[in-house]
Image (cartoon, grey):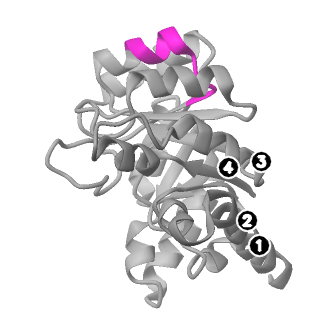
Amino acid sequence: MRLYINIDHVATIRQARRATEPDPVAAARLCEDAGADGITAHLREDRRHIQDADIIGLRDQLRTPFNLEMACTEEMIGIAERLKPFQVTLVPERREEITTEGGLDVTRDPGAIEAAIGRLKSVGIRTSLFIDAVPMIVERSAWLGADAIELHTGPYANHPHDPRYLAALRDGARQGASIGLAVHAGHGITVRNVGALMTIPELEELNIGHTIVSQSVFVGIAGAVREMRRAMDAARVAS
């Protein structure tokens, strides 16, 4: 299973002082050295953490695939068309939220989502939708032309001992794969709860960010990536 590291909160630390450090691009390179298979960053409309210059630096300096998370807006689609990251993941976005609070509602203005996917794919960008593990949402994601879905693991992360949430992820992954979608997952994943996700055979990729940056305070960002990789590998062997 691929491990993508989200480096948004490296930029959050920098933006707290509007300074020049820590540099998210340098952090991303260390993550690659430590075993990350790719890097994710979310360019928010309010630019609260990642900035436009960071996206350019990531595109130019990464050695692994770059996944750009963004809202489905004209501004963001235009940026992606110019910069051409490996993948764009469309996510919901509200100015007042602290972090992404749920999956993209693909039933709200599906024409805009379908048009955005079409524009991105026309310039060679792989497309993914960050969604809740709901059968109708999974199905409609395929209808809209996405290459992949990223299942929102927040409910599972918040209730790891409630079997309903893991079951929903299992069912969503199975359904997505059965209709030709690549299946990713992310949000709230830590070394303590990643093990169960490793038992879902259809999952191809995890996007993990906050826990990596948090743990890096204690062990460094490369050490935090290695800890996550060890936890994933141990769970895979055990399963």
Q: Earlier in the sequence, mark 1 or mark 4?
A: 4
Question: Which segment did they paint magenta?
Answer: 78-87
Q: Are the residues at dot 3 and dot 4 in contact (C-beta closer than 8 Å)?
A: yes
The foreground one among 107 and 159 is 159
- What is the three-letter code of the residue carrying label 4? Cys
Question: Residue shown at 29%/15% (left/top)?
Answer: 74
Q: Secondary structure at mark 4?
A: helix
In the figure, 140 relative to 156: above or below? Answer: above
Residue type of the residue flagged with mark 1: Arg
Which numbered circle lies on residue 54?
A: none
Distance between mark 1 and mark 3 Cα atoms: 15 Å
Say which element carries label 3: helix
The nearer-to-camera label among 1 and 4 is 4
* Image spot of residue 48 (x, y percent): 27, 39
Q: Quadrant of the C terminus?
A: bottom right
Q: Secondary structure at mark 1?
A: helix
Q: Is residue 3 above or below residue 23?
A: below
Q: Is residue 123 left or right of residue 188?
A: right
Asked whether residue 193 is drawn in magenta, I would say no
Q: Earlier in the sequence, mark 3 or mark 2?
A: 3
Tag 3 residue = 33
Mark 1 against mark 3, which lies toward the viewer? 3
Place of residue 147 in the rendered image (x, y in percent of width and height, measured from the top left)? 60, 34
Mark 2 element type = helix
Q: Is the stretch drawn in magenta largely helix, strand or loop?
A: helix
- Determine the CA span between mark 1 and mark 4: 14 Å
- Cβ atoms at labels 2 and 1 below 8 Å apart: yes
Q: Which residue is mark 1?
A: 230
Label 4, on which residue? 31
Q: Which residue is mark 2?
A: 226
